[in-house]
């Protein structure tokens, strides 16, 4: 009998976290690694949010919190959904969790049975497939390419649906591609869902504010999708609060109550101090963090210009998030400095070892032709990193 469960033995290690660990290991050996692998803003949490946390400590917030979140935090989230997304929720439809990742675990845990199929437009966030599989679901990958800005078409969605389809999970802006679905593109998907009323959608909108022009549309805002969409969000990206670990959902009441039930047996309520700080974050206008978005856009333009100067890197122009997802198939089958490059994983490891730049293989995101490069780093680091990459592949 195996010591460990089949469930954990069959689960992949998070590729982004694994690459970050490898980069830390090499730094420990004295190597000058530039980390462009993690999806983490390099800004400090804004002072107005930190001040709210300090006040909460001084006000002696130190007890267990309600499983689904403080009532006044849920009201702040309701305000945010109405202001930013034109979505109307009741407190009973909101569940606050220890990060958006726990929210996704909750959703899979309360909605999926063995054999239920979940459509995942590729590329998708690295943990979607393993979360789905952990709860008995079957990921159904829908391949996209750089030529369609890594976005799934209505025709592809229709073709992927079977009698076993239970859900679709997607992010917009997308991690890892930075792609943003327009209102018109979402409408085309909604028209397909209208013919299949039993399919639910998880809309991961954690990057909604890191958007460079076309604006954000929530799929739950389409009347026919409101009762079939679980909107997942949080404060990690837009407010540079990754370590504070607060995510939340707006969902049909029955699903929200089930998530509350599951979370009550898992972690119970999220951190009390972080919740008090997030009240302030949600109540403030997104304009308070526009300076970060402006800087990310400058970095996007910088890194695209530098990558376009390297033969073999083919990039589109992402409209959101803080990643580029270049196609690197040009290098497959080639030998660089004595190392054979068979796939994106080989190429990503080659860049780490030879250029001392940490990226992430696209295979982890369901797209084996690409690598993900985060530009949540200073412009100086970006310039140096791409210079090293250029030298390593010349």
Image: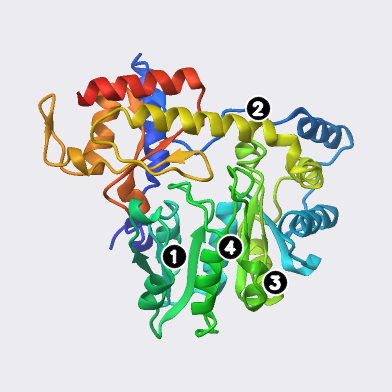
Residue 132 marker: 1
Q: Is residue 201 above or below residue 277?
A: below
Give the quarter of the image for residue 360: top left
Point out the image quarter for the N terminus. Answer: bottom left
> Earlier along the polypeptide chain: callout 1 or callout 4?
1
Total marks placed: 4
Q: Residue at x 81, y 30 (%)?
A: 51
Q: CA distance from mark 3 to mark 1?
A: 20 Å
Q: Which mark is residue 44?
A: 2
In the rendered image, which residue does mark 3 sit on? Answer: 257
Where residue 51 is drawn, which disc sits there? none
Residue 339 image position (x, y, % from top left): 13, 30
Q: Are marks 2 and 1 in contact (CB under 8 Å)?
A: no
Rendering coords of residue 336 (x, y %)? 14, 28
- Categorize mark 3 by other alpha carbons within 10 Å: few (<14), some (14-19), many (20+): some
Query: How far apart, in angstroms, are the residues tagged by discs 2 and 1?
Result: 33 Å
Q: Residues within 10 Å of mark 4 (few under 14, many from 20)?
A: some
Residue that badge 4 annotates: 183
Residue at the limit of the structure toward the right, as seen here: 59
* Image point (23%, 23%), residue name: 392
**How far apart are the two marked residues, 1 and 4, measured between alpha carbons?**
27 Å
Label whose residue precedes the other's in the sequence (2 or 4): 2
Q: Residues within 10 Å of mark 1 (few under 14, many from 20)?
A: many
Q: Toward the viewer: 77 or 381?
A: 381
Q: CA distance from mark 3 to mark 2?
A: 34 Å
């Amino acid at each position: 009998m195996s010591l460990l469960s089949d469930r954990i033995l069959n689960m992949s290690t998070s590729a982004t976290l694994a690459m970050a660990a490898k980069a830390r290991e090499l730094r420990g050996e004295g190597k000058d690694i530039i980390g462009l692998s993690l999806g983490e803003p390099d800004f400090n949490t804004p002072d107005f949010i930190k001040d709210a946390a300090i006040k909460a400590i001084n006000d002696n917030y130190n007890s267990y919190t309600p499983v689904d979140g403080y009532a006044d935090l849920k009201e702040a989230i309701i305000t945010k959904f109405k202001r930013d997304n034109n979505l109307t929720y009741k407190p009973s439809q909101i569940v606050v969790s220890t990060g958006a990742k726990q929210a996704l675990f909750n959703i899979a845990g309360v909605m999926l049975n063995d054999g239920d199929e979940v459509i995942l437009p590729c590329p998708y966030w690295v943990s979607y497939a393993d979360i789905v599989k952990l709860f008995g679901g079957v990921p159904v990958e829908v391949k996209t390419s750089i030529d369609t800005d890594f976005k799934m078409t209505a025709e592809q969605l229709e073709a992927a649906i079977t009698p076993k389809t239970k859900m679709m999970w997607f992010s917009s802006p997308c991690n890892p591609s930075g792609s943003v679905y327009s209102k018109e593109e979402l409408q085309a998907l909604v028209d397909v869902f209208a013919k299949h009323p039993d399919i639910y959608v998880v809309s991961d909108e954690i990057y909604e504010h890191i958007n460079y022009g076309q604006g954000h549309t929530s799929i739950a805002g389409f009347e026919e999708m409101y009762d079939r969409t679980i909107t997942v969000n949080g404060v990690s990206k837009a407010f540079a609060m990754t370590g504070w670990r607060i995510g939340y959902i707006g969902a049909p009441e029955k699903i929200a109550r089930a998530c509350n039930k599951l979370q009550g047996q898992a972690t119970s309520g999220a951190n009390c101090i972080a919740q008090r700080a997030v009240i302030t974050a949600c109540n403030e206008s997104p304009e308070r963090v526009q300076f970060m978005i402006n800087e990310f856009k400058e970095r996007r333009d910088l890194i695209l210009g530098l990558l376009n100067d390297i033969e073999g890197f083919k990039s589109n122009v992402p409209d959101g998030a803080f990643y580029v997802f270049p196609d690197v198939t040009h290098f497959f089958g080639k030998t660089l400095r004595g190392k054979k490059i068979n796939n994106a994983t080989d190429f990503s490891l080659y860049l780490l070892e030879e250029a001392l730049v940490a990226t992430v293989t696209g295979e982890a995101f369901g797209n084996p032709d690409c690598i993900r490069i985060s530009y949540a780093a200073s412009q100086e680091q970006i310039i140096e990193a791409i210079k090293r990459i250029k030298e390593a592949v010349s």
